[in-house]
Amino acid sequence: MVSLKDIEHNTLPAQLTFLPEIKIEKVAKERICLEKQRRLRKVTTKPRTTRVSESYPSPNGKRKRSKNEGAAENNKRKRGNKIQEPPPELPEKIKNLISHLPETREVSRAKLVIQKPLRETDVSNHHNRMSIPAKHIRETFLTEEEELKLCMRDEKNVESMDVPLITPTMEMAKVSLRRWPMNKQSGPPSISYVLTSTWNKIKEQNGLKSGMKVQLWAIRIDGVLCFALNSLV
């Protein structure tokens, strides 16, 4: 474990900046498709007719919905289901700890990365990691450079980042953040981030058990990513 002073003077190794490759071939194909569409519009001489959807009364006197009306309503319902509740406030105990930093330090707005119940694999000594499924992430917390760094890998290992972590008992630790693509039998792989390396020690010292609900917050201090783990039980 390290103290708050370690965070104050902590300087991570300089992050490498990787320029994303420009997919020229994809851009060229898109331009060819657009050119074909323009030519087809010029050749077509028939005026476009707007198709009006008709609705017919049902035997009980009520008007039946047209296919277009039904599809629009379904889309509205789907969009409504995706709306998330606003994130909760950063816990006071974490705010108080951060408030002890010197005023010269630049502290960003805290972002709720994930709120989840811990699963058996999150507290298993064998796995030694807490998973953060990408599809359950509430707010983007990585910069483009950090994301690109975590996407890199050699033949066996994935890249990782050492990130300071405020534990539920308000102690300072350091975890390794990694990005894992999880292959599936069909479809594209699912992505999950994990906190690992020292996770077993953090779990034991803070009494984290399966089923306990936790929050993981991301805070940047002078641009350096830091995590804060809060237990809701």
Image (tube, rainbow, N blue to C red):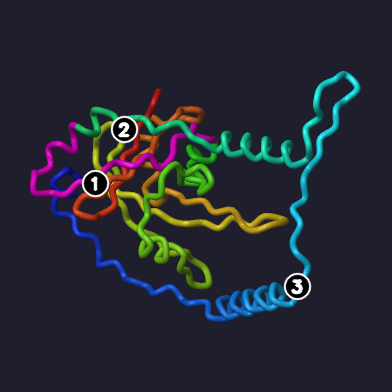
Q: Residue at x 74, y 53 (%)?
A: 50
Q: Is residue 131 above or below residue 179?
A: above
* Number of the front mark, 2 or 1: 1
Q: Which of the pair 227/109 is nearer the observer?
A: 109
Q: Which mark is residue 44?
A: 3
Q: Quadrant of residue 35?
A: bottom right
The reply to whether the C-beta atoms of the residues labelled 2 and 1 are less than 8 Å apart is no
State the residue lying farthest toward the top: 60
Q: Which of the pair 143/167 is nearer the observer?
A: 143
Q: Is residue 89 left or right of residue 120?
A: left
Dot 1 amino acid type: Ser
Q: Is residue 227 left or right of residue 42?
A: left
Q: Position of residue 101 (x, y in %)?
A: 12, 42
Q: Which residue is mark 2?
A: 168
Q: Quadrant of residue 120?
A: top right
Q: Which residue is mark 1?
A: 108
Q: Which residues are magenta?
A: 96-119
Q: Is residue 209 left or right of residue 98?
A: right
Q: Position of residue 37 (x, y in %)?
A: 67, 73
Q: CA distance from mark 1 to mark 3?
A: 56 Å
Q: Is residue 209 left or right of residue 190?
A: left
The crowd level at tag 1 (other Cα within 10 Å; few <14, some 14-19, many 20+) is some
Instruction: Report helix, strand or loop for mark 2.
Output: loop
